[in-house]
Image: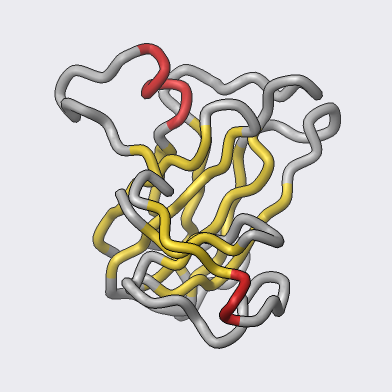
Amino acid sequence: MEGFVCKICGFISIDGTAPDKCPVCGAPKGSFEMKQDAIKIPKDVNNLTELEKKHIPVITLVKKCGLIPEGCQDVQVKMGEIQHPMLAEHSIVHIDFYIDKKVISRVILTPDKLNPAAALHLKVTNGKLAVIELCNIHGAWIKEIDL
C-alpha cells in the first residue's frame, strides 16, 4: 500500500497527500517521499501467514468506556493474533492511530518495558479507524475498521 513517508520520524500519510508539516515531528513537506510499499497488507485476509499474524494489528472496540461513561468508546490494539516480540533487536517501534485517514495519536513503545499494545479513549463514534504499527525489522502494517 502506498503512502507519503516522513524521512525524519517515519509517519505515513495515508490520505494521498504529503502534509505541509508532519503532524508527528513537525518536519516540512519536503521531508516526505512517496513509497509504493510504505505499508504492508496481507496477501489473503482469510489465510494469514505466521508473519502476518504477528504484525497485523488486532483491534477491539469497546462501545462503553470504563473511565469516561458519557460520549467515549475505547479502542484497544495489540500487535498480531500471535503476540509480537518486544526485544531490543526485534520490536514494535510505535503505533499510529488515524480516523478518516488523519492521524490522531502516536504511541511510542519501549521494547524492554512495554507489551506490543495500546489503547485510546475516543470521543468520536463514527468514521473509519486505521491503526498502523511499525516493526523495526518487518516494516509498517495496517488494519482498518468502521467505528
Looking at the picture, how far across and down is residue 62, in whole percent?
Answer: 41, 54
Looking at the picture, how far across and down is residue 100, in whole percent?
Answer: 33, 73
Looking at the picture, how far across and down is residue 52, in whole percent?
Answer: 37, 23
Quadrant location of the C terminus in the rendered image: bottom left
Q: In the displayed orientation, state which residue is furthest to the right.
A: 113
Residue found 40% across the figure and 34% down from its top = 56
Which of the 4 image quadrants contains residue 129? bottom left
Residue found 33% across the figure and 54% down from its top = 2
Residue found 72% across the figure and 71% down from its top = 25
Q: In the displayed orientation, state which residue is furthest to the top.
A: 50
> Residue 147 or 96: which is nearer the viewer?
96
Q: Is residue 128 above or below residue 94?
A: below
> Residue 127 or 54: which is nearer the viewer?
54
Looking at the picture, how far across and down is residue 71, in whole percent?
Answer: 45, 80
> Residue 81 or 51: which is nearer the viewer?
51
| Chosen colour scheme | secondary structure
Q: In the displayed orientation, state which residue is furthest to the bottom.
A: 20
Which of the 4 image quadrants contains residue 109? top right
